[in-house]
Image (tube, rainbow, N blue to C red):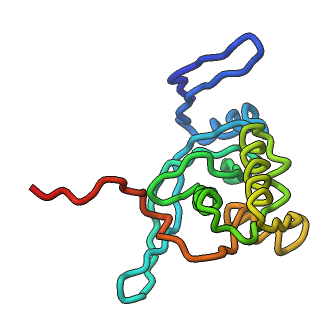
Amino acid sequence: MKLIHKDIEKDNAGQVTLVPEEAEDMWHTYNLLQVGDSLRASTIRKVQTESNTGSVGSSRVRTTLTICVETIDFDSQACQLRVKGTNLEENQYVKVLAHVEKATDALAVDTLLISDKLFRHQDVPTRSRYVRLVDNVRDNGGNVRIFSSLHVSGEQLTQLSGVAAILRFPIADLSEPEDDSSSDED
């Protein structure tokens, strides 16, 4: 294993950048990781795209994800590390909730659907973010439905980022960034 960067504080908090050079290095990584850690790694994801005609195609793409580690598993036969967690940063292929938060800010949320896992998240700022979201929806007259992650409906919601909303009224496409500038005509 090649150590690229190390910044460890006295309380063992900090960050390291490692590059595995052989299969056995995954075992060492397995022993370093803990639940609640942030992990950035390259992975392959199946991405579905929809054309203007409505046809759906899929392809496999390599992308870099940053997740908050929830579970860690090591397959000793294949020397593979499997890490499960929630996305902390979005990229062109993986989006992070932000849609529901924007809808909440626009007072459009009638019913918030949220997984109880988000209230037990290891990362305190993430947990606080969802508590504020629930409070905002309730303050604006919306309903909140909390789904148990032990039930199949809660598991499915967790797979879809853990949060969704039923809107009072339609709002502009949230996947495109807002543009406050008017058209530029010269």
Q: Percent from the top left, x then y, of residue 127?
A: 78, 44
Question: Quick one: quadrant of the C terminus?
Answer: bottom left
Name the residue: 57% across, 41% down: 40
Name the residue: 55% across, 28% down: 17
Vertical placement of residue 124 versus 52, above or below: above
* Res 156 quadrant in image: bottom right
Residue at the outermost left position: 186
In the image, taking residue 161 as reference, residue 148 lies left or right, namely: right
In the image, taking residue 36 as reference, residue 99 lies left or right, namely: left
In the image, taking residue 130 as reference, residue 145 lies left or right, namely: right
Q: Percent from the top left, x then y, of residue 120?
A: 85, 48
Q: Percent from the top left, x then y, of residue 16?
A: 60, 25
Give whichever of 22, 102 is nearer the camera.
102
Name the residue: 81% across, 68% down: 143
Vertical placement of residue 147 versus 36, above or below: below
Q: Percent from the top left, x then y, of residue 62?
A: 46, 56
